[in-house]
Amino acid sequence: MHFLQGLTRFLLLSACVAGLNIAATSQQVAEKADLDYQTAAVLYMQKAAEYRALAYQAYNLARLRLDADLDKKNVKKLPKEQRKLPRSIVVDIDETVLDNSPSQAYGIKTGRPFSQADWYAWGEMRKAKAIPGAVDFLNYAVSKGVKVFYVSNRDEVQKAATIANLKTAGFTDISTDNVLLRTAGSGKDGRRAIAANRHRVVMLIGDNLDDFTSAFERKSVADRFAEVEKAREEFGKRFIVLPNAMYGTWENAIYEYGRLTEAQKAEKRAAALELP
């Protein structure tokens, strides 16, 4: 399905079901933006063998850590109350297990800044491919009796399309129970708690530091650096990070979490560059 067909389908569906103001949405979508600054990041994800290598590296490391945790000797080291708990893994979805770079590329080509309508339309297409290494690792984890929880800030209305896309991409054990999308705020602590209920969370995997702990949420660039230093021993062990230079909280921190125009964002990016 062509992207614009998907967008039209979404707008009509939303107007019928949720009373969406199509005129207002169309005005938002029509806003033009210079997104050329994202081009290198999208091309890196789509065309760089180095990106694929980093993704495989992350999931190969995750498998090593899981295998170590599965070792009976490791279980004996755990507190007694945790020894019989089944294992779980918490993963983000976008840019962690599913590749949305075509959606980003579409925005660059058309000069369309991020809009919920475009994002929903892309999701309805159910065409996102799996991140390299993700399917093999997560299906391996499931085969070992590990429950995988997909904790994403996609909106709850996207759940059916998200589940279908995950299944099409090759992931197993996908259901409404373990695909936990956003119903209120963007914080993930409550949904991570669901994954920890009656399970022992072995590791968390994501492309954004907010995927691991709320300690990183809405922090300045400097404070995010400081939090990384505090948690440095967790990376490569309990926290497995995927690269994402296209977007993320790292960029929001540069904008100081403000609601800025595209021109103001460009000024902030330029001012943040460190020069010789």
Image (cartoon, helix red, strand yellow):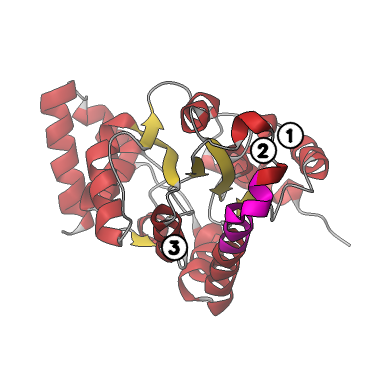
Residue for point 33% across, 56% down: 171
Is 70 part of what is drawn in magenta?
Answer: yes
The amino acid on which the numbered mark 1 sits, given as a three-letter code, is Ser
Residue for point 53% across, 58% down: 38
Marks 1/3: CA–CA distance? 29 Å
- Mark 1: secondary structure: loop
Q: Earlier in the sequence, mark 2 or mark 3?
A: 3
Check if mark 2's residue and mark 3's residue have beta carbons within 8 Å: no
Q: Earlier in the sequence, mark 1 or mark 3?
A: 3
The amino acid on which the numbered mark 2 sits, given as a three-letter code, is Ala
Magenta: main secondary structure equals helix
- Mark 3: secondary structure: loop
Residue 274 at what x, y percent from top left?
82, 55
Label 3, on which residue?
A: 131
Residue for point 12% across, 35% down: 12
Label 2, on which residue?
A: 253
Magenta range is 63-75
Residue 63 at what x, y percent from top left?
56, 62
Label 1, on which residue?
A: 220
Outermost residue toward the bottom in this view: 49
Residue 56 badge? none
Would you say 95 lies left or right of 76 here? left
Marks 2/3: CA–CA distance? 25 Å
